[in-house]
Image (tube, grey):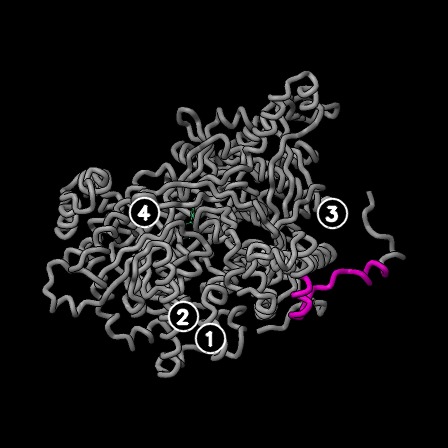
Amino acid sequence: VEASIPEPQRDAWKKFQAKPFVSKDDFEKEVVRHVETTLARSMFNCDETAAYAAASLAFRDRLITEWNRTQQRQTFADTKRVYYLSLEFLMGRALDNAMLNVGLKNIAKEGLSELGFRIEDIINQEHDAALGNGGLGRLAACFLDSMASLNFPAWGYGLRYKYGIFKQEIVDGYQVEVPDYWLDFNPWEFPRHDIVVDVQFYGGVRKYQDEAGKNVAVWEGGEIVKATAYDVPIPGFNTPTTNNMRLWSSKAASGEFDFQKFNSGDYESSVADQQRAETISAVLYPNDNLDRGKELRLKQQYFWVAASLYDIVRRFKKSKRAWSEFPDQIAIQLNDTHPTLAIVELQRILIDMEGLDWDEAWTIVTNTFGYTNHTVLPEALEKWSVPLFQNLLPRHLQIIYDINMFFLQSVERKFPGDRDMLGRVSIIEESQPKMVRMAFLAIVGSHKVNGVAELHSDLIKTTIFKDFVKIFGPDKFTNVTNGITPRRWLHQANPRLSELIASKTGGLGFLKDLNVLNELEKFADDKEFKKEWAEIKYANKVRLAKYIKSTTGVTVNPAALFDIQVKRIHEYKRQQLNIFGVIHRYLTIKAMTPEERKKLAPRVSIFGGKAAPGYWMAKTIIHLINNVGAVVNKDPDVGDLLKVIFLEDYNVSKAEIITPASDVSEHISTAGTEASGTSNMKFVLNGGLIIGTCDGANIEITREIGENNIFLFGNLAEDVEDLRHTHNYGSHTLDPDLVKVFDLIKSNAFGDAGAFGALTGSIEDHGDYYLVSDDFHSYIQTQTLVDEAYKNQEEWITKTILSVARMGFFSSDRCINEYAEMIWNVEPLPVGKESGLGKEE
Ligand code: GPQ
């Protein structure tokens, strides 16, 4: 059906087209209109929730106008687009970000104030969009911000979970999970009830030869689930470009089938079908760096991939180009292996539905996809059981077998007679049951594979994907070091620091070209500047101290050294090393004379992060941290010298308060286990120093900011394997200071020691896989260096200024430009003068 307005009527249309507000009065008018009409309230009935809703709707209207223009511009220009497929988008709040990116926050602030509201209170009404677990999901969110800010024609595709990552409550020191139903009121999404895709599951495959003798496969039977699109506008910073994140929601196909059941009196089971279908997009799996192989998860993956590819292919077909041009028009990036089925699905569409030859189709497929690996941890590498696959996606399993056959044939030609090699690289693992190795499939089906920091990209080439480097050559493997968006993680989270930087570097340009921060180097010894710099850090610590008081009841001294570790709780991230270090500090303080105590720098140890609900060891670590806090925080011998805080329910909006308030933050994973880390970048960008291992992006941060400005400790990645071997087959004596810590725990000093037996036992008796004891001494020593360094505030401040000045490399803009050039081969679409942007700086 032709849906455009006829040419002669377009003038009338244009005359009445929505115009984005730019003035305070127009903004207020919009807010009042939304309160009175959209929300059906009045000035006598307008609380902060209603004001939040109305302000958001005012900005949403504005974004959608630019969204429409952007989509039109990109369609007319007909240039190559990027599709970023991610099962997680950890977006956080949208209102503050929208106001800052379109440059109208001050107008909104004044407007809201005239209407009787404080903008901070309004911003705080918003529920985080928490459709992700941790770093991987937040990276996807930073990428969307950068792609829009750099004017790339780019879409994100994901799932519209009804429940995001659970909310964490701490009850008697234990983590308790509470469901996160976030869709009560979400002004940022647009349901597209006209964009619905049928997704098939189960059934069987019928094969035959057509009249021309061609082999045909038909996937038939099974069941259909409907995918409905929900669009979320993604505003770029200081540009009209507003991109799209499309999230799919599942619903039962309410076709004849249901109807029959209904009519035959089987009402209950037709409702049950509906519920079963809706289960697909109901909940985000809460595991970080862990694969559990659940059928519903595979269903989610195929549901999302099939709907997204259908959408992408449909858009391509409208251009009437030859199939061979597909990779010239489309780049699809796979965020980890979760969307790997997209490779198989595109091959299926091309050969089964569009009638292309295998080879022709496969060339298109491999030129379209790029795959990003985010971990080397074996428990996180996805594998799906063949029987499960066979049942759920029978045709896809056949195609995977064919892909594998052609691939193994090519390996055989290259390495004749190397049977071991064939077994090692086969996409099908010959186990009981057989398993599909998704990372191998992703490598074979992509033209580029990248890791997320230099060390990590080297490690994948020399360990888990070593054979593939031999097979495909080294050029297929590359590195794109992660980055973060300075808009959210500096401008939004730390407005005063952003303002100070702007005042010294000639405006907000640094937010678009983060290397401009370099200009701060000349202020590293400037007295006046350092004073302002230190005042801002102090104010951010006061803000966090207030937050700590209001949420935990504990009073902390903002002049103390704030030592922060916030991230998912995981043995490889070693929060246990941190808390054992805290206990060691407690023992040290207890043994000191009052005179000695006076010389010690007071410290607040702050933890935050969620444990996967089924990860007992991680939950035990949370329990220990809370119990240590309960003892230490009320010990009169200790006073202000040490406080231990666990912040409940760490999420993106809390990170915006926590990150600017660190003096040091901890990034202390066992070397070689943290692929990159991204909070390390956020903390340094906000004027905090870090204590870290030689792991992930810590190494490149050191290279950029200089080794005098970071506290590195611990064994190197290259030595980890040997150390583990010694633990298991040699003599394993624990660090004596760690033994004292364990003795204290075992004396029930922090509650019944039985609760922590598995934790201490994993180190004492079960091989200390994460090298806690090996690194303990080095860690404690380095913490002492931190204490010493902090006493010299003048030098400390200079270090933090120099560090911030050298962080330009870690902008996600740099990162996206690298993807665009090395992997996607796409260019930005420059924006003309049609911008309706506010002119705020
Ligand atoms: N990451 Cl495989 C996750 O957050 N979840 C995952 O399931 C996997 C990786 C992280 C990784 O641990 C960090 O080191 C990275 O900085 C981050 O991905 C983004 O690349």
Does 384 appear above or below 645? above
Task: First in sequence, mark 1 or 4: give its number.
Answer: 1
Q: Residue at x 26, y 70 (%)?
A: 790
Circles 4 and 2, Cβ within 8 Å, touching? The answer is: no
* Rendered location of residue 563, percent (x, y): 30, 61
Q: CA distance from mark 4 to mark 3?
A: 49 Å
Mark 4 and mark 3 lie on one chain; the one further toward the N terminus is 3
Name, please, the residue furthest toward the top: 264
Alpha carbon of mark 2 to alpha carbon of mark 3: how far? 48 Å
Circle nearer the N terminus (1, 3): 3
Residue 804's tag is 2
The answer to whether mark 1 and mark 2 are in CB contact below 8 A is yes
Q: Which mark is residue 558?
A: none
Which mark is first along the chain, 2 or 1?
Answer: 1
List the single residue furthest toward the front. 44
Residue position for label 4: 572
Q: Residue 19: say if magenta.
A: yes
